[in-house]
Image (cartoon, grey):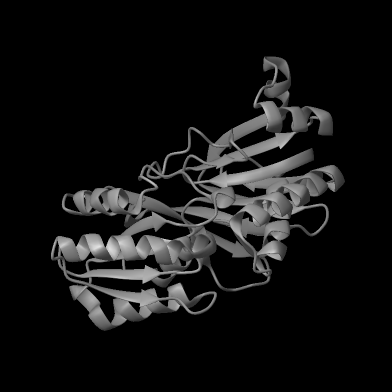
Amino acid sequence: MNGLFFIINQHSGFGRGEKAWKKVKKELEKKKISFRSFYTDYHGHAEVLARQIATIQDYHLKTIIGVGGNGTMNEIVNGLSGFTKVKIAFLYTGRTTQRSHSRLSSNPSKAIKNILKMLSRPVNKVDLVEYQLEGKGVKRKYFNKLGMGLTTKVIEQENLLKKELMKPILFRIRFMTGFIKVIWGYQPISIMMKTDKQEMVQHDNVWLLSVSNQPYQWAGIKIAPKAKENDGMLTITMIKNISLFQLVVFLVFKQMSHHVKQNAFSEFTCEKIMISTNAVQTIEADGELIGESPVTVVVKKSHSELVI
């Protein structure tokens, strides 16, 4: 278990990152496991730290464990791009509104025990996904999902609240108020998609689009329950062709008639997809706003050993 490095976003989840790290540190010291830890100081710092650690340690580096939200993990994944022999593990301490699929316990002590147990045996490699925004030469990666539409507008609303210091309960109240406003004022969009399997097709009246690499839930809805992180495929999911009333009923009660659901949910798989829109749309990856459409996305099979 040598070579454990931790990158901690202590501000994630309204300070949950700091509290979780204290419990994890106590567990590591109890087990007399050697480790080094680094705190992030600004947006993008986890990526810089991961790259610096991997470069300095070279082949001695075995594992980096992130403590933070989806954005922290995304930064670590991009920082370790090119260092394919490093195992990446993750303890989620972000806000539940952005939480990705995870098999780990939300209890820090139990989670670190599970991580250490999994790291002691061979770990299956996990695909990463590479995206490139049109007009920008830089290619970046994500591990969970890329999305646009209603989910992105909700993240924009959430980011506005993040800039204000507030208690979790106040954040949730104001977030739900903003969530209702976003849904009420949102206008479905038109999306054009071209894949490695299909020529350009236009989809109208789209509420949200997700390009997933793992099972993903949003607002309690299973957006991509069949997505697999190591099958070399992207799972494309759209919710479209339903009224605002039908969408709200679905979000609240998680119920939809079979007929409506057949028309509302569209899902398929591919290895590469190019997405453009009738009007410029903001895009997010792993819960972080990354830029605007159009975008090209391609899966990179078995890139890293990821434990989440």
Q: Residue at x 67, y 16 (%)?
A: 258
Q: Does 244 appear above or below 193? A: above
Location of residue 238 (image quadrant): top right
Q: Is residue 244 left or right of residue 81?
A: right
Residue 71 visible, this orientation: no
Please provide percent x and percent y for residue 155.
67, 56
Q: Position of residue 263 (x, y in %)?
A: 72, 24
Callout count: 0
Expressed as whole percent of the image width and height from the top left, the position of residue 213 reads: 48, 46
Say if 125 sits above or below 137 in the image: above
Left or right: residue 230 compared with residue 15: left
Location of residue 117 in the rendering, given as x and y in whole percent from the top left corner: 20, 49
Relative horizontal placement of residue 88, taking residue 9 as reference (left or right): left
Above or below: residue 265 compared with residue 285: above
In terms of image quadrants, where is residue 196? top right
The answer to whether 70 is drawn above or below residue 223 in the figure is below
Question: Which corner quadrant holds the N terminus?
Answer: bottom left
- Say which residue appears at 61% left-offset and 60% top-offset: 167
Judge whether residue 63 can be spotted in this image. yes
Question: Residue placed at 63% from the left, 50% from the top?
Answer: 147
Classify residue 250 by image quadrant: top right
What residue is rendered at 56% in x and 73% in y?
138
